[in-house]
Image: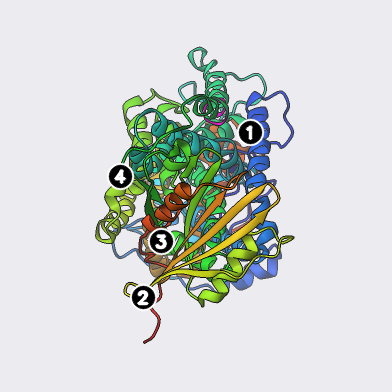
């Protein structure tokens, strides 16, 4: 806590001439007209001498004459009332006996809660089931859409709970995520390839796999030659909504798995992106 | 209120003997590390998003700091406490609590109960639990760092608002990257600004700042500086912050109509709560100065004239100016500030400062603004 050596009223000028000017130029005070009582008007409401500032200066308020010690005597040395609990606890001052342990309890609770949410709960999640078989017809939510997986595949439970499910069958892994794009499709494909494909491996030109002109859905496919196995990138665009299906494996997959992958891509349903969607002019 | 000279929750940056300081340092550094780790790739890949987010964050933060400071008319939070609270909210609460905790809780719900439940209700369950508790504990940690106590619910609300503001700014910055990633970096500036427009513009009053202010006031009721704890009221406020946050994140508000209805109801309810806390704050002020009035050190009418809200004080000052001239308004504010400082000094047991402020009040009795200056006499 800080304290000041001097406390000046606002607008105060330290020079005596300023005070003279201020006294001579300030407007004369008036009566309060709506019942409130400004501090310096206390006791003056019935006073007739409101003609000049000087007279107000020199006339002590009648109401306070009854207690002259307010004006003329220094109050006795201040003693902290025992009923007031100290806000600040400097030096040897301690809180009441019953509250001395409270800070330690609060700190312990804080540390324990931090350990719980950042260490214990992730460890518990890691120890629980990580993937389970997909039920027939089961759908999983994406951030802006949903996807259905064929039976016989497994789904990553934590990923699906967080809106980014990973489907696996053997070594084959399918990840799906969604987004939005408002520009040309060519630019979208270029950007996705730039972000998703290893830049050291020249990517083939995306091939339009399925253009369902009736509902404006476009599906592009890129086969990737990854260092640790084959891969496929499928880009699905429906107006401003976009989904990217990334398939990776350590070995070439069978035709049955290939049919499932195509089915997964076909099952992607893209929700509207209300804030991002800008309808193109006809 | 610029006439206040004293600062509440003054703290030192180096106090290794204080366990709360260690808790703040460790968790803030840990949070900084994980928050930075989470953003590292994004900043490298999308530097324009980072710059845009920083610029908007600075402007938004400056506005909110001004907005939270204005109603501090019965005590002003010290700058260091503000920094400590912002750092806790922006780094510790996000990096050390929320980022890991939210994902883990949602995953556990999916693993233990149902993926659909976790996907639909996970954010409504996990985020309020981790984030609101983490931010509320930040209020406690800052108070303990300052070796102080919360005297009024408004003090808790102000500290909570600062912690929530730190969290809000950090979260918005992170969300900017998330949305730009979803947009494949097509329009980094535009997408980032849309995030801020929605979260900090349209729904500005449904924010972590508001939620944490409510929870902070609850802590003040549960752990008061004086008087008996009001556990039920305090717990109700903390739970209200958690519940409203949960409602806001829930799928119940997917329709824009309901969302805007709740968005209007939350600030309305918060305003009503603040009015209640203001009465408690004024009661603390009057009770603290009651012994001063009883012994004739200050006039009762002086204490009675200190209004409990900014609006009421403005109204009073306008009336004073109308009656006594423009100079009287400044003097009224000056006197209000001295009285509040006196209450703060008395409450803090700062005897020397209390004597100085008491004498300053006495000097004002029967004088006009341009009266002789006051040089305080040390108490004997």
Magenta segment, which residues? A114-118
Residue under mark 2: which chain is it in? A
Q: Which residue is mark 2?
A: A213
Q: Quadrant of residue A120?
A: top right
* Residue in the foreground of this view, choosing between B226 and B14: B14
Q: Main secondary structure of the magenta part?
A: helix
Q: Which residue is mark 1?
A: B27
Sooner in the amino-acid sequence: mark 1 or mark 3: 1
Q: Where residue B314 is drawn, which disc sits there? A: 3
Residue under mark 3: which chain is it in? B
Residue under mark 1: which chain is it in? B
User: Marks 2 and 4, how far apart in space?
Assistant: 26 Å
Q: Are marks 2 and 3 on the same chain?
A: no
* Residue in the foreground of this view, choosing between B34 and B286: B34
Quick one: SS at disc 3? helix
The residue lying at 59 percent from left, 60 percent from top is: A223
Q: Which residue is mark 4?
A: A137
Q: Position of residue B311 (x, y in %)?
A: 38, 58
């Amino acid at each position: 806590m800080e304290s000041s050596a001097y406390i000046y009223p606002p607008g105060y000028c330290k020079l005596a001439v300023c005070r003279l000017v201020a006294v001579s130029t300030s407007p004369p005070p008036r009566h309060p007209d709506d019942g409130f009582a400004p501090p310096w008007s206390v006791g003056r409401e019935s006073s007739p001498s409101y003609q000049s500032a000087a007279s107000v200066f020199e006339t002590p308020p009648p109401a306070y004459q009854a207690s002259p010690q307010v004006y003329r005597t220094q109050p006795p040395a201040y003693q902290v009332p025992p009923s007031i609990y100290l806000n600040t606890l400097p030096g040897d001052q301690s809180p009441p006996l019953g509250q001395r342990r409270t800070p330690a309890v609060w700190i312990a609770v804080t540390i324990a809660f931090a350990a719980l949410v950042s260490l214990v709960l992730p460890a518990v999640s890691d120890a629980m089931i990580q993937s389970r078989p997909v039920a027939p017809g089961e759908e999983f939510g994406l951030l802006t859409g949903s996807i259905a997986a064929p039976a016989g595949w497994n789904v990553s439970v934590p990923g699906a709970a967080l809106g980014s499910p990973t489907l696996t069958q053997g070594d084959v892994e399918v990840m799906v995520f969604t987004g939005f794009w408002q520009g040309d499709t060519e630019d979208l494909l270029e950007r996705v390839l730039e972000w998703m494909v290893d830049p050291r491996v020249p990517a083939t030109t995306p091939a339009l796999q399925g253009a369902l002109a009736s509902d404006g859905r476009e599906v592009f496919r890129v086969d990737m030659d990854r260092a640790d196995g084959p891969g496929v990138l499928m880009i699905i665009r429906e107006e401003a909504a976009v989904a990217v299906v990334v398939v990776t494996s350590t070995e070439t997959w069978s035709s049955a798995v290939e049919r499932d992958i195509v089915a997964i891509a076909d099952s992607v349903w893209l929700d509207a992106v209300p804030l991002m969607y800008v309808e193109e002019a006809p | 209120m610029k006439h206040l000279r004293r600062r509440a929750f003054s703290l030192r940056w180096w106090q290794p003997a204080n366990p709360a300081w260690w808790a703040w340092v460790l968790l803030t550094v840990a949070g900084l590390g994980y928050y930075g780790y989470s953003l590292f790739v994004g900043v490298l890949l999308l530097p324009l998003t980072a710059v845009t987010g920083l610029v908007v964050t600075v402007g938004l933060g400056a506005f909110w700091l001004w907005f939270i400071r204005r109603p501090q008319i019965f005590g002003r939070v010290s700058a260091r406490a503000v920094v400590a609270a912002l750092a806790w909210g922006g780094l510790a609460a996000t990096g050390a609590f929320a980022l890991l905790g939210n994902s883990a809780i949602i995953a556990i719900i999916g693993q233990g109960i149902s993926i659909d439940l976790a996907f639909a209700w996970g954010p409504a369950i996990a985020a309020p639990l981790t984030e609101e508790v983490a931010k509320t504990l930040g209020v406690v940690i800052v108070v303990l760092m300052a070796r102080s106590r919360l005297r009024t619910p408004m003090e808790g609300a102000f500290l909570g608002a600062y912690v929530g503001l730190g969290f809000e700014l950090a979260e918005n910055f992170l969300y900017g990257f998330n949305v730009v990633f979803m947009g494949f970096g097509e329009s980094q500036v535009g997408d980032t600004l849309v995030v801020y427009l929605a979260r900090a513009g349209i729904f500005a009053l449904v924010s972590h700042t508001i939620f944490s202010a409510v929870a902070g006031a609850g802590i003040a009721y549960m752990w008061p500086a004086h008087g008996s704890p009001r556990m039920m009221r305090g717990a109700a406020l903390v739970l209200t912050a958690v519940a409203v946050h949960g409602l806001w994140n829930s799928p119940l508000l997917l329709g824009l109509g309901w969302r805007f209805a709740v968005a209007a109801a939350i600030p309305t309810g918060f305003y009503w709560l603040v009015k209640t806390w203001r009465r408690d704050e004024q009661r603390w002020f009057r009770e603290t100065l009651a012994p001063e009035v009883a012994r004739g050190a200050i006039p009762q009418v002086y204490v009675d004239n200190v209004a409990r809200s900014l609006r009421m004080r403005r109204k009073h000052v306008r009336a004073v100016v109308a009656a006594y001239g423009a100079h009287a308004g400044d003097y009224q504010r000056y006197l209000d500030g001295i009285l509040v400082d006196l209450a703060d000094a008395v409450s803090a047991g700062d005897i020397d400062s209390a004597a100085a402020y008491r004498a300053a009040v006495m000097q004002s009795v029967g004088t006009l603004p341009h009266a002789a200056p006051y040089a305080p006499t040390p108490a004997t």
